[in-house]
Image (cartoon, rainbow, N blue to C red):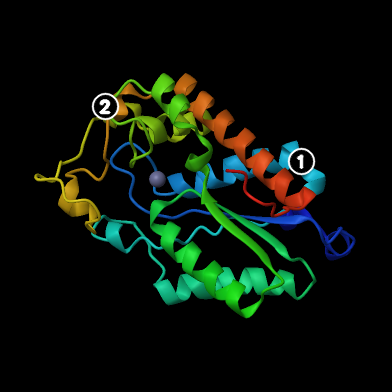
Amino acid sequence: MKQYEATWPEVGALDRDTVVLIPTGSIEQHGHHLPLGTDSILATAVAEEVEKAIPDKVLLTPTVWLGASGHHLPFSGSLSASFEGYDSVLRSIILSLAAHDFYRFYIVNAHGGNTEPNAVTLRKLRMENPNLQLGSIGYFHFIDQSVFDATLEGKRKGIRHACEAETSLMLHVRPDLVRKDKVKDDGLEPQPAVPGMVWHFDEVTTDGSLGEATRATAAKGETLFNAAVSGIVEAVSGLHAGVQLVETEY
Ligand SMILES: [Zn+2]
Protein backbone atom coordinates (compact mmCIF):
# COMPACT_ATOMS: atom_id res chain seq x y z
CA MET A 1 0.00 0.00 0.00
CA LYS A 2 1.15 3.52 -0.77
CA GLN A 3 0.73 5.67 2.34
CA TYR A 4 0.50 8.88 0.31
CA GLU A 5 -2.55 7.61 -1.57
CA ALA A 6 -4.23 5.72 1.29
CA THR A 7 -6.86 6.89 3.77
CA TRP A 8 -6.28 6.60 7.50
CA PRO A 9 -8.79 3.75 7.97
CA GLU A 10 -7.03 1.83 5.19
CA VAL A 11 -3.70 2.22 7.00
CA GLY A 12 -5.45 1.50 10.31
CA ALA A 13 -6.74 -1.80 8.95
CA LEU A 14 -3.31 -3.05 7.90
CA ASP A 15 -1.73 -6.05 9.56
CA ARG A 16 0.95 -4.71 11.91
CA ASP A 17 3.46 -7.23 10.54
CA THR A 18 3.44 -5.03 7.41
CA VAL A 19 6.91 -3.71 6.56
CA VAL A 20 7.09 0.08 6.41
CA LEU A 21 9.30 0.87 3.42
CA ILE A 22 10.98 4.28 3.54
CA PRO A 23 12.87 5.50 0.46
CA THR A 24 15.58 8.10 1.14
CA GLY A 25 17.08 10.29 -1.56
CA SER A 26 18.50 13.76 -2.00
CA ILE A 27 18.28 16.99 -3.95
CA GLU A 28 21.87 17.46 -5.01
CA GLN A 29 23.95 18.12 -8.08
CA HIS A 30 24.52 15.21 -10.46
CA GLY A 31 26.86 16.78 -12.98
CA HIS A 32 25.69 18.62 -16.08
CA HIS A 33 23.59 15.78 -17.45
CA LEU A 34 21.40 14.47 -14.57
CA PRO A 35 18.82 16.41 -12.55
CA LEU A 36 19.19 17.46 -8.93
CA GLY A 37 16.46 15.03 -7.97
CA THR A 38 18.25 11.95 -9.38
CA ASP A 39 18.64 10.10 -6.06
CA SER A 40 15.05 10.82 -5.00
CA ILE A 41 13.75 9.80 -8.42
CA LEU A 42 15.66 6.49 -8.32
CA ALA A 43 14.75 5.75 -4.68
CA THR A 44 11.09 6.37 -5.51
CA ALA A 45 11.13 4.32 -8.72
CA VAL A 46 12.78 1.32 -7.07
CA ALA A 47 10.53 1.45 -3.98
CA GLU A 48 7.36 1.86 -6.06
CA GLU A 49 8.28 -1.19 -8.10
CA VAL A 50 8.82 -3.16 -4.88
CA GLU A 51 5.43 -2.02 -3.60
CA LYS A 52 3.84 -3.04 -6.88
CA ALA A 53 5.35 -6.55 -6.56
CA ILE A 54 4.30 -7.16 -2.94
CA PRO A 55 1.60 -4.58 -2.12
CA ASP A 56 0.14 -6.61 0.75
CA LYS A 57 3.45 -6.81 2.60
CA VAL A 58 4.47 -3.17 2.37
CA LEU A 59 3.39 0.26 3.53
CA LEU A 60 5.39 2.58 1.29
CA THR A 61 5.97 6.07 2.73
CA PRO A 62 6.68 9.05 0.51
CA THR A 63 10.38 9.48 -0.31
CA VAL A 64 12.47 11.49 2.12
CA TRP A 65 13.79 13.83 -0.53
CA LEU A 66 15.98 16.08 1.61
CA GLY A 67 19.22 14.24 2.25
CA ALA A 68 22.53 14.82 3.97
CA SER A 69 24.38 16.43 1.06
CA GLY A 70 26.78 18.91 2.63
CA HIS A 71 29.57 17.59 0.41
CA HIS A 72 27.68 18.79 -2.70
CA LEU A 73 26.68 22.26 -1.49
CA PRO A 74 29.21 24.23 -3.55
CA PHE A 75 27.13 23.29 -6.64
CA SER A 76 24.08 25.46 -7.34
CA GLY A 77 20.69 24.10 -6.41
CA SER A 78 22.00 21.41 -4.08
CA LEU A 79 20.20 21.19 -0.74
CA SER A 80 21.29 19.60 2.51
CA ALA A 81 19.63 18.92 5.82
CA SER A 82 21.81 19.27 8.89
CA PHE A 83 22.62 15.86 10.38
CA GLU A 84 20.39 16.77 13.33
CA GLY A 85 17.54 17.83 11.05
CA TYR A 86 17.84 14.70 8.93
CA ASP A 87 17.88 12.50 12.03
CA SER A 88 14.83 14.32 13.36
CA VAL A 89 12.80 13.78 10.17
CA LEU A 90 13.66 10.10 9.90
CA ARG A 91 12.94 9.34 13.55
CA SER A 92 9.69 11.34 13.37
CA ILE A 93 8.46 9.19 10.48
CA ILE A 94 9.37 5.97 12.26
CA LEU A 95 8.09 6.98 15.70
CA SER A 96 4.79 8.28 14.26
CA LEU A 97 4.08 4.92 12.67
CA ALA A 98 5.45 3.07 15.70
CA ALA A 99 2.81 4.91 17.72
CA HIS A 100 0.28 3.21 15.41
CA ASP A 101 1.89 -0.13 16.34
CA PHE A 102 3.91 -0.68 13.18
CA TYR A 103 7.26 -2.15 14.21
CA ARG A 104 9.04 -3.20 11.04
CA PHE A 105 10.86 -0.46 9.15
CA TYR A 106 13.15 -0.85 6.16
CA ILE A 107 14.88 2.09 4.53
CA VAL A 108 15.81 1.87 0.85
CA ASN A 109 18.46 4.49 0.28
CA ALA A 110 19.65 5.97 -3.02
CA HIS A 111 22.17 8.53 -1.75
CA GLY A 112 25.60 7.60 -0.42
CA GLY A 113 25.63 10.62 1.91
CA ASN A 114 22.62 9.22 3.77
CA THR A 115 24.29 5.90 4.53
CA GLU A 116 25.88 6.81 7.84
CA PRO A 117 23.07 9.16 9.00
CA ASN A 118 20.49 6.40 8.36
CA ALA A 119 22.59 3.92 10.31
CA VAL A 120 23.13 6.27 13.26
CA THR A 121 19.42 7.13 13.47
CA LEU A 122 18.43 3.46 13.40
CA ARG A 123 21.08 2.53 15.98
CA LYS A 124 19.76 5.20 18.34
CA LEU A 125 16.12 4.25 17.75
CA ARG A 126 16.86 0.58 18.39
CA MET A 127 18.55 1.43 21.70
CA GLU A 128 15.48 3.40 22.75
CA ASN A 129 12.90 1.00 21.27
CA PRO A 130 14.18 -2.59 21.36
CA ASN A 131 10.83 -3.84 20.06
CA LEU A 132 11.37 -2.19 16.66
CA GLN A 133 12.81 -4.13 13.74
CA LEU A 134 14.93 -1.67 11.77
CA GLY A 135 17.02 -1.89 8.63
CA SER A 136 18.58 0.46 6.09
CA ILE A 137 20.42 -0.35 2.89
CA GLY A 138 21.28 1.16 -0.46
CA TYR A 139 19.34 -0.20 -3.43
CA PHE A 140 22.72 -0.64 -5.13
CA HIS A 141 23.67 -3.21 -2.47
CA PHE A 142 21.24 -5.63 -4.13
CA ILE A 143 22.99 -5.45 -7.48
CA ASP A 144 25.43 -8.31 -7.24
CA GLN A 145 29.02 -7.58 -8.23
CA SER A 146 28.71 -10.21 -10.95
CA VAL A 147 25.81 -8.19 -12.43
CA PHE A 148 27.84 -4.97 -12.31
CA ASP A 149 30.80 -6.81 -13.90
CA ALA A 150 28.65 -8.27 -16.68
CA THR A 151 26.70 -5.06 -17.32
CA LEU A 152 29.12 -2.14 -17.06
CA GLU A 153 31.85 -1.56 -19.62
CA GLY A 154 33.83 1.15 -17.84
CA LYS A 155 36.72 0.65 -15.43
CA ARG A 156 34.60 1.13 -12.28
CA LYS A 157 32.15 -1.71 -11.78
CA GLY A 158 29.77 -0.15 -9.31
CA ILE A 159 27.86 2.99 -8.41
CA ARG A 160 29.80 6.25 -8.18
CA HIS A 161 28.04 9.53 -8.96
CA ALA A 162 26.19 10.44 -12.15
CA CYS A 163 28.37 7.65 -13.55
CA GLU A 164 27.84 4.85 -16.08
CA ALA A 165 25.54 2.98 -13.66
CA GLU A 166 23.51 5.90 -12.33
CA THR A 167 23.13 7.52 -15.74
CA SER A 168 22.01 4.15 -17.15
CA LEU A 169 19.42 3.86 -14.38
CA MET A 170 18.10 7.32 -15.20
CA LEU A 171 18.02 6.47 -18.93
CA HIS A 172 15.80 3.53 -17.95
CA VAL A 173 13.57 5.33 -15.42
CA ARG A 174 13.36 8.94 -16.67
CA PRO A 175 15.14 9.28 -20.05
CA ASP A 176 13.37 12.59 -20.60
CA LEU A 177 15.42 14.11 -17.76
CA VAL A 178 18.85 13.04 -19.03
CA ARG A 179 20.63 15.85 -20.91
CA LYS A 180 22.14 13.56 -23.53
CA ASP A 181 24.15 16.33 -25.17
CA LYS A 182 25.86 17.10 -21.84
CA VAL A 183 26.95 13.56 -20.90
CA LYS A 184 30.71 13.30 -20.35
CA ASP A 185 33.24 11.34 -18.31
CA ASP A 186 34.48 13.17 -15.23
CA GLY A 187 36.40 12.69 -12.01
CA LEU A 188 39.82 13.15 -10.44
CA GLU A 189 41.85 10.31 -8.93
CA PRO A 190 43.46 11.15 -5.59
CA GLN A 191 47.14 10.09 -5.88
CA PRO A 192 48.37 8.33 -3.86
CA ALA A 193 45.09 6.61 -3.02
CA VAL A 194 44.35 6.94 0.70
CA PRO A 195 41.25 4.91 1.62
CA GLY A 196 38.70 6.46 3.93
CA MET A 197 39.28 10.14 3.13
CA VAL A 198 36.31 12.52 3.35
CA TRP A 199 36.23 14.54 0.12
CA HIS A 200 33.88 17.25 -1.02
CA PHE A 201 32.73 16.87 -4.59
CA ASP A 202 34.23 20.14 -5.80
CA GLU A 203 37.62 18.69 -4.79
CA VAL A 204 37.33 15.49 -6.84
CA THR A 205 35.39 16.54 -9.94
CA THR A 206 35.20 19.55 -12.19
CA ASP A 207 31.60 19.21 -13.38
CA GLY A 208 30.15 17.29 -10.41
CA SER A 209 30.01 13.75 -11.77
CA LEU A 210 32.36 10.83 -11.15
CA GLY A 211 32.73 8.06 -13.70
CA GLU A 212 32.21 7.04 -17.29
CA ALA A 213 28.74 8.36 -18.01
CA THR A 214 29.35 8.25 -21.78
CA ARG A 215 29.03 4.46 -21.61
CA ALA A 216 25.52 4.62 -20.10
CA THR A 217 22.57 2.98 -21.87
CA ALA A 218 18.93 2.40 -20.96
CA ALA A 219 19.40 -1.36 -21.39
CA LYS A 220 22.16 -1.41 -18.76
CA GLY A 221 19.89 0.65 -16.52
CA GLU A 222 17.06 -1.84 -16.90
CA THR A 223 19.34 -4.74 -15.90
CA LEU A 224 20.61 -2.90 -12.80
CA PHE A 225 17.12 -1.69 -11.87
CA ASN A 226 15.57 -5.15 -12.08
CA ALA A 227 18.39 -6.65 -9.99
CA ALA A 228 17.86 -4.02 -7.29
CA VAL A 229 14.09 -4.49 -7.24
CA SER A 230 14.19 -8.28 -7.05
CA GLY A 231 16.81 -8.15 -4.27
CA ILE A 232 14.71 -5.75 -2.21
CA VAL A 233 11.52 -7.75 -2.82
CA GLU A 234 13.30 -10.81 -1.47
CA ALA A 235 14.70 -8.95 1.56
CA VAL A 236 11.40 -7.31 2.46
CA SER A 237 9.52 -10.58 1.98
CA GLY A 238 12.02 -12.20 4.36
CA LEU A 239 11.48 -9.49 6.95
CA HIS A 240 7.72 -9.85 6.52
CA ALA A 241 7.89 -13.63 6.97
CA GLY A 242 9.83 -13.10 10.22
CA VAL A 243 13.58 -13.35 10.59
CA GLN A 244 14.77 -16.18 12.84
CA LEU A 245 18.25 -16.23 14.30
CA VAL A 246 19.65 -19.74 14.06
CA GLU A 247 22.94 -21.29 15.12
CA THR A 248 25.67 -20.74 12.55
CA GLU A 249 27.00 -23.92 10.98
CA TYR A 250 30.80 -24.00 10.64
ZN1 LIG B 1 23.11 9.90 -7.07
> How many residues crowd around disc 1 within 10 Å: few (fewer than 14), some, or many (20 or more)?
some
Name the residue carrying label 2.
155
CA gap, disc 1 and disc 2:
36 Å
The answer to whether 96 is drawn above or below residue 180 in the figure is below
Whether label 2 lies within 8 Å of ligand 1 gets the answer no
Q: Quadrant of ligand 1?
A: top left
Whether label 1 lies within 8 Å of ligand 1 gets the answer no
Q: Is residue 193 visible?
A: yes
Q: Are marks 1 and 2 in contact (CB under 8 Å)?
A: no
Name the image quarter holding residue 19. Answer: bottom right
Please, what is the three-letter code of the amino acid marked with disc 2? Lys
Please, what is the three-letter code of the amino acid marked with disc 1? Ile
Front in this rendered view, residue 163 or 122: 122
Q: Secondary structure at mark 2?
A: loop
Q: Residue at x 58, y 29 (%)?
A: 226
- In the rendering, at what x and y percent does residue 205 appear? 19, 45
Q: Residue furthest bottom?
A: 128
Name the image quarter holding residue 35. Answer: top left
Between discs 1 and 2, the one toward the N terminus = 1
- In the rendering, at what x and y percent does residue 93 appear? 63, 69
Q: Nearer the viewer, mark 1 or mark 2?
A: 2
Q: Residue at x 86, y 58 (%)?
A: 14
Q: Residue furthest left?
A: 191
- In the rendering, at what x and y percent does residue 201 appear? 23, 52
The answer to whether 219 is drawn above or below residue 134 in the figure is above
Q: Residue at x 13, y 46 (%)?
A: 190
Point out which mark residue 54 bears: 1
Q: Is residue 1 visible?
A: no
The answer to whether 6 is drawn above or below residue 249 in the figure is below
Front in this rendered view, residue 37 or 110: 110
